[in-house]
Image (cartoon, rainbow, N blue to C red):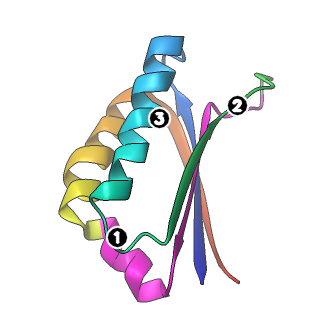
Amino acid sequence: MITHIVLFKLSDPSPENLDATREKLLSMQDRIDLLRHLETGLDVIRSERSYDIALVTRFDTLEDLQAYQIHPYHAGVVVPHMKLVCSSIVAVDYES
């Protein structure tokens, strides 16, 4: 199993932008069949070093993760939105 974790810092972390961005991420659940698990969370601490939204996804194989990266919905809808609204994005991928 491959776990893919992404943290997003929004340029404008208003409640409206946080909710809209979280919903955009959650919308992948019904559109990308390679996803074995998808969850998002909004930061509750709000410290200076915090990121605003976390995305945790899981895939059966590294090949499935790579296919997800270029999936039309992910690459054509979600990624452009995230690049538009985020000031910083970091990720980690690991095998378990």
Classify the position of the C terminus by image quarter. Answer: bottom right
Residue 41, above or below 48: below
Kindly state the secondary structure of the residue where label 2 is placed. loop
Magenta residues, start to end = 49-69
Do residues under tags 2 and 3 come within 8 Å of each other at their CB atoms? no
Numbered circles on residues, count = 3
**Numbered mark located on residue 68 in the image:** 1
Which residue is pictured at 42% across the width and 31% down the height? 21
Is 60 in the magenta?
Answer: yes
Q: Residues within 10 Å of mark 2 (few under 14, many from 20)?
A: some
Which amino acid type is shown beneath numbered disc 3? Arg
Residue identifier under label 2: 43
Residue identifier under label 3: 22
The image position of residue 76, as x and y in percent, is 19, 52
Which residue is pictured at 31% across the width and 46% down the height? 78
Of callouts 3 and 1, the N-terminal one: 3
